Image (cartoon, rainbow, N blue to C red):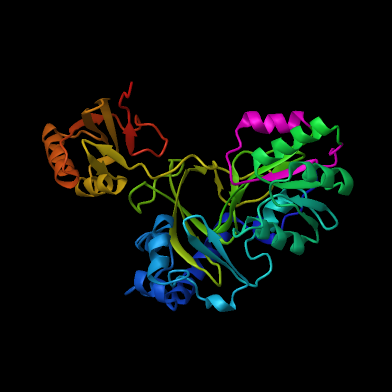
Amino acid sequence: MSDTLDFLEQRHPLQREADLMNGLPQLIARAQAATGWGRILHGVAAGEIRDRAALAQLPLTRKSDLHELQAQQPPFGGLNTTPHRQLRRLYVSPGAIFDPEGYGQDWWRFSRPMRALGLRAGDLIQNCFTYHFTPAAFMVEGAASKLGCAVIPAGIGQTELQVQAMSALRPDAYVGTPSFLKIIIEKAREMGADIGTVQRALLSAEALPPSLRQWFHDNGVPHVLQLYASADVGNIAYESLSNGRLNPGMILDEDLILEIVRPGSGDPVAAGEVGEVVLTSFNPDYPLIRFATGDLSAVLEGVSPCGRTNTRIKGWMGRADQVTKVRGMFVHPSQLAEVLKRHPQVLKARLVVSGAMANDVMTLHCEAQDAPALAAEQIADSLREITKLRGEVLFVAPGSLPNDGKVIEDARKYE
């Protein structure tokens, strides 16, 4: 399958990094003009934020904070730099969380993943994301308009009508959730309908396990790509093809700065280590500075065979929110981050909660080099002071803790 890359996607990684860092001072200054960002970034000298080290000193703004921020200052918490009545659309996500859309072409930056799927001017797309209140369907619409693709605005539900539309209008691609595509294919088989023109699918909003991807291949959809996106950021990362074959990892969007941080803190982790996805977006209407998504992922080393040179991630690997209740009290990843700050000799830690119900045992497994016995007692004191719970400290060899992003593991038995 042929593919066309734009010049930004093919930049040397050092050139891309320089371009992004050079744009940071202007981004921070523009964000500070919005009242919400003005509070969050109060006292920050925008001109001094010129590299990743300086960026990492700024506070995180968590996706989970949006509801409260928006309640304090409707509708967008003062994070929008364009007044809300001058925007193109205002969305309502469950929660209720409000998301904006501006007037810029392909505002959600969806054209790159759609082009990676092989979509070109003149192609026809059956858009099966919902058009009701949330932005996913309009993300597709904006990209289709930029690429010159026609769209069947199918939305969700009405499975029989979906099949009839595919059979009659012969679309080239499906865009929507994996589960709904499977339902449509099964309904088409039940109806004896031919929907074989749908050779490509761009899937998002749900997990796509390898078994389901293979099921699509076995049932007439050979080219399937997954997209990682959100209603706050738009396109985050996407898969690509080379000669019709799926490439490893997901390629980061060109207009984002990615950090992978230790859950519960804003501290970047080592390359390849699983952590929370934190994004800085250069969106002109709704900039996001160190926006903590709550999702886990890790950087995948190397460059994609498709020729795109941007950072790759391993895809969605779970949620970073690992709040656990121990002896009637909540323990948060941020509390463990505070323990580690007090004890810099600890390279990495994982709190394991074990035992049977009502008999919880809390053990902090710590990677450290040549830690003295006294250090264990000091760390245990800090753990008790911060969490208000007693716990043991166990030193383990550096590199022995799992690389899965977990800082709290609930290993209790509930039988």
Verify whether residue 199 appears in magenta.
Answer: yes
Q: Residue furthest right?
A: 168
**Compared to 307, does 41 lie above or below?**
below
Using the rendered view, name the quadrant where residue 143 is placed: bottom right
Lateral position of residue 344 relative to residue 187, left or right: left
| Residue 355 sits in quarter | top left
Which one is in front, 261 or 406? Answer: 406
The residue at 59%/41% (across/down) is 249
Q: Residue furthest top?
A: 415
Q: Quadrant of the C terminus?
A: top left
Residue in view at x 44 percent, y 59 percent: 291
Identify the magenta region: 194-219
Residue 18 image position (x, y, % from top left): 53, 63
Q: Is residue 380 magenta?
A: no
Q: Is residue 52 above or below residue 341?
A: below
Residue positioned 33% across, 48% down in the render: 264
Across and down, in percent, residue 405 comes to 40, 39
Q: Quadrant of residue 105?
A: bottom right
The number of numbered badges drawn on the structure is: 0
268 in relation to 104, above or below: above
Left or right? Give the position of 285 relative to 385: right
- Closer-to-camera residue (134/80): 134
- Quarter of the figure with the N terminus: top right
The residue positioned 42% from the left and 61% from the top of the image is: 66
- Tell me residue 373's x, y (percent): 13, 32
Residue 86: % across, % down: 58, 78
Q: Is residue 327 visible?
A: yes
> 160 or 43, which lies in front?
160
Q: In the figure, is residue 176 to the left or right of 294? A: right
Q: Is residue 110 visible?
A: no
Identify which residue, 33 or 307, lies in the foreground: 33
